Image (cartoon, rainbow, N blue to C red):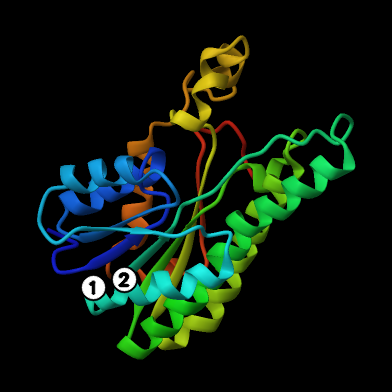
Amino acid sequence: MEFEGMNVLVTGASRGIGRAAAELLAERGARVAVHYASNRDAAEDVRAGLPGAGHVTVAADLGETDALGSLVEEVFGRFGRLDVLVNNAGIFESHVPTEASFEEWKRAWDRTLAVNLLGPAHLSFLVGRRMVEQGGGRIVNVSSRGAFRGEPDAPAYGASKAGLNALGQSLAKAFAPHGVVVCTVAPGWVETDMAADHLRGPKGDAIRSQSPLGRVATPREVAEAIAFLSRPGNQSLTGCVLDVNGASYLRT
């Protein structure tokens, strides 16, 4: 199995894309740290269902900077080393510029940037330095097509994901001489709990029709992309941003 003997931390792994990534990487031999923010029961269910042995659950609010050092220490303390970090956890909060109050606008920006950009940035710094010391590793960020096309109902989300893309490319350059590869996957709509209300609602058909496939991606499809970018070898992929949006948005 291609990930046998490797240790992986997946943030936001209690549901959705994170859960699918944890399951797929475990199926292929990895030992997984299942991160969650607050839903311990869901995270424990994921961990208990993973094939193989040695998987753990770890908790931290990625929007709280002081919690990140403890999270990294716990993972390295339990695993000894970390081969792959998947920065998947994220939030989406609507704050339509023409409708939100300034207080709502500020709260959405503060929280979204804290979880979606600053959390992955600080975690990548802390884990990346450890990976340099151990002789290499991989960091895979989960971004969004919203980084490219814009998010009019949630500008902070689009900005946070654009920042995540730039972060990954900057760290790819910084860490490459030390054997640490940094890549990004950018999904469009995905069949997750977070998207369920939209997909089942009156705009569901319109959302699905954005792709010539006539559907949105499954969490497993995005997980396959994460696993591809996490594989040993393929170092020349460092700095890439891989679109997984069913041709619903094409960059030039």
List the residue tagged with mark 2.
Answer: 75
Question: Residue at image x 63%, y 52%?
Answer: 161
Residue 246 seen in render? yes
Hey, what amino acid is under mark 2?
Answer: Val
Question: Residue at image x 22%, y 73%?
Answer: 79
Q: Which of 78 and 154 is in front in this view?
A: 78
Q: Is residue 129 above or below residue 92?
A: below
List the residue tagged with mark 1.
Answer: 78
Local crowd size for mark 2, using a 10 Å CA cut-off: few (<14), some (14–19), many (≥20): many
Distance Cα–Cα, label 2 vs label 1: 5 Å
Disc 1, SS: helix
Whether tag 2 and tag 1 are in contact, CB under 8 A, the answer is: yes
Question: Residue at image x 27%, y 69%?
Answer: 232
Residue 203 percent location from the top left of the image:
62, 14
Q: Is residue 203 above or below residue 191?
A: above
Q: In this view, does 58 lie above or below 130?
A: above
Question: Residue at image x 53%, y 64%?
Answer: 120
Disc 2, SS: helix
Q: Residue 166 carries which label?
A: none
